[in-house]
């Protein structure tokens, strides 16, 4: 996904890390960079809002349970693949 506007950090890169950001699992400098991007990019902010709502729903349904690290890593890989696939598909449609 890209909003078409130039940013210091690419939209795809930000959205690929949104779960790390939400889980407070990225370094402070990276959090700052992502926060700055979300403040400036409406489409990414909307996507972030959706992700935040999904996380809140999962938290309500699952309570304090945490997923095993292997599962979390597999989900991160799959989400990254989806972001890359969506980006590639969008570019192909534009051509």
Image (spheres, rainbow, N blue to C red):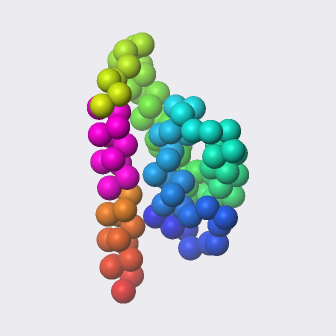
In magenta stretch: residue 37: no
Q: Is residue 17 left or right of residue 86?
A: right
Q: Position of residue 26 (x, y in %)?
A: 57, 38
Q: Is residue 22 above or below residue 84?
A: above
Q: Nearer the viewer, residue 6 or 72?
A: 72
Res 39 visible: no
Specify the quadrant that holds the C terminus.
Answer: bottom left
Q: Is residue 15 left or right of residue 73?
A: right
Magenta stretch in the rendered image? 71-81
In this view, which residue lies farthest toward the top?
64
In magenta stretch: residue 74: yes
Question: Residue sitting at 46 percent across and 27 percent down?
Answer: 56
Q: Position of residue 1 (x, y in %)?
A: 46, 64
Question: Residue sitting at 35 percent across and 33 percent down?
Answer: 72
Question: Residue sitting at 51 percent across and 57 percent down?
Answer: 13
Q: Main secondary structure of the magenta part?
A: helix
């Amino acid at each position: 996904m890209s909003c078409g506007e130039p940013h210091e950090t690419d939209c795809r890169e930000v959205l690929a890390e949104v779960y790390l950001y939400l889980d407070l699992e990225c370094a402070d400098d990276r959090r700052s960079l992502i926060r700055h991007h979300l403040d400036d990019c409406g489409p990414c902010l909307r996507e972030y809002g959706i992700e935040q709502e999904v996380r809140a729903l999962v938290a309500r349904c699952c309570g304090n349970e945490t997923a095993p690290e292997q599962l979390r890593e597999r989900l991160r890989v799959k989400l990254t693949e989806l972001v890359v696939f969506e980006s590639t598909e969008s570019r192909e449609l534009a051509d």
